[in-house]
Image (spheres, rainbow, N blue to C red):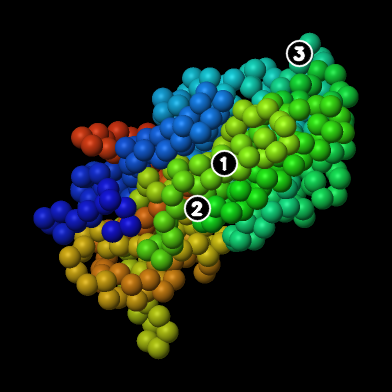
Amino acid sequence: MLYPYLSTNENGHLTIAGHDTVSLAQKYGTALFVLNVDRLQENCRIYVDTLRECFGDNAMPLFASKSLSFTGIYTLMNRFGMGTDIVSCGELYTAKKAGFPLEKAFFHGNNKTDSDIAYALDNKIGYFVVDNEDELLRLSAIAKEYGITQKILLRITPGIDPHTHKAIVTGSVDSKFGKAIETNQAYEIVELALALDNIELCGFHCHIGSQIFECQPFCDASDCMLAFIHEVKKRYHYEAKMLNLGGGFGVRYVESDPEVNIADNIRAVAAHVKTKCQEYGLSLPYILMEPGRSIVADTTVTLYTVGSVKEITGFRNYVSVDGGMTDNPRYALYQSAYTVLTANRMNEEADYACTVAGRCCESGDLIQENVMIAKPERGDILAVLTTGAYNYSMASNYNRLPRPAILLVGNNYEKLAVRRESFEDLCRLDLDL
Ligand SMILES: Cc1ncc(COP(=O)(O)O)c(C=O)c1O
């Protein structure tokens, strides 16, 4: 099985952290996200412990909450020793509602509006990760009105090719994010940040992409960023105190995906950072990393109920479930691979080739094509693994489908973290005419 916390019980049912998924589906309904909170804690611990081992107190992992945002996740992240990054005031508000210490929050995004900036300042956010000059100038002006000096990092594009899907590459020169070293524009924005009032430049940020299995692109990115820090020091007599190396480590969606040893990868990146600092005569900056997917993706399984099995002679078989692109748009967006299991037929042969389709009025609403599962029938439960990242956070109400609940499970633990949306919720913003 893809993860050790998944097993099969005496009824031939899939279990997650010892909980029978078929019973969970009956009790809470489907579609349902089931999140293993013990696995979540283990994933956080790898980052917290390894960064501490490499850098002592001079480092912190931030949870990239775009990957999964609801009130309880910020409570858990704080409990498990993580800071957070947020990309909108909605995420900021959610973190605040959870009582998350906002001095440990970093505000990302390539288009922060004036009201975003003001809201973040009102809430005393720790750091802005400034993307561009327009933002920087407005932040300086608004911070001046507030009579404060705002701490910032600048987002730099190091121009590294991370060998991942093109839609999730973010650190190449032709990107909507950040300022490129290659074009000299990264230096220009540093010069501006250093000249502006009410801005304290604390350092730099880069993020090269997502679902990256190899360590080398991260090592290359850290080499590149330290060379940049060195050059900035030479040009402007300014030495960065912080370096945020972004997120991006890959996770296993299917058996053929490689295992990623995140602790070893962090150690390798740390070695690069230390070597380059020595080589350039720089003090070791405070190191931040910003994982999302590798914190939450492999914690979660989505449970669906099968509604129909349609066999089109000479073509293919469609298994339709009571969810789809509204709770998991990643196949429609990136053709992402997933492992699918027939959760109530775990002891049967997975010999039925099919396409798992969602229930939306959209031909592209597919969860996975060409998978082999135990042949299901109406009423059976399908489990789609590794759905913790960029699923609930990308969920929508297309076709007015209510979003699923999120159930936390662990060893002798079961608690709803997000309730299922009701029809009433769907109409809560609509006004009578
Ligand atoms: C700026 C930034 N930081 C962190 C992340 C998290 O990346 P991942 O979920 O791959 O770890 C992303 C995701 O795209 C990002 O854009």
The response on whether ligand 1 sits within 8 Å of label 2 is yes
Residue in view at x 37 percent, y 74 percent: 354
Task: Name the residue that disc number 1 marks.
Answer: 271
- Residue 104 percent coordinates (x, y): 57, 24
Quadrant that contains the C terminus: top right
Furthest-bottom residue in this view:
314
Q: In terms of secondary structure, where does tag 2 sit?
A: loop
As helix, strand or loop, the secondary structure at mark 3 comes to: loop
Q: Is residue 338 left or right of residue 228?
A: left
Q: CA distance from mark 3 to mark 1?
A: 37 Å
The residue drawn where x is 73% and y is 36% is 280
In screen coordinates, is 263 left or right of 191?
A: left
Q: Earlier in the sequence, mark 3 or mark 1?
A: 3
Q: Give the vertical position of 251 relative to 75 (above or below).
A: below
> As drawn, is 226 to the left or to the right of 20?
right
Q: Measuring from the top left, give residue 286's x and y in whole percent.
A: 62, 28
Q: Quadrant of the N terminus?
A: bottom left
How many neighbours does mark 2 have within 10 angstroms: few (below 14), some (14-19), or many (20 or more)? Answer: many
289 above or below 258?
above
Closest to the observer, 83 or 66:
83
Q: Quadrant of residue 37?
A: top left
Q: Nearer the viewer, mark 2 or mark 3?
A: 2
Q: Which mark is residue 250?
A: 2
**In this rendering, does residue 145 appear at all?**
yes
Q: Which of pointers 2 and 1 lies earlier in the amino acid sequence?
A: 2
Eye-nearest disc, 3 or 1: 1
Label 2 close to label 3 by CB (< 8 Å): no
> What type is the residue that disc 1 sits on?
Ala
Residue 229, percent across and down?
Answer: 75, 36
The residue that mark 3 highlights is 148
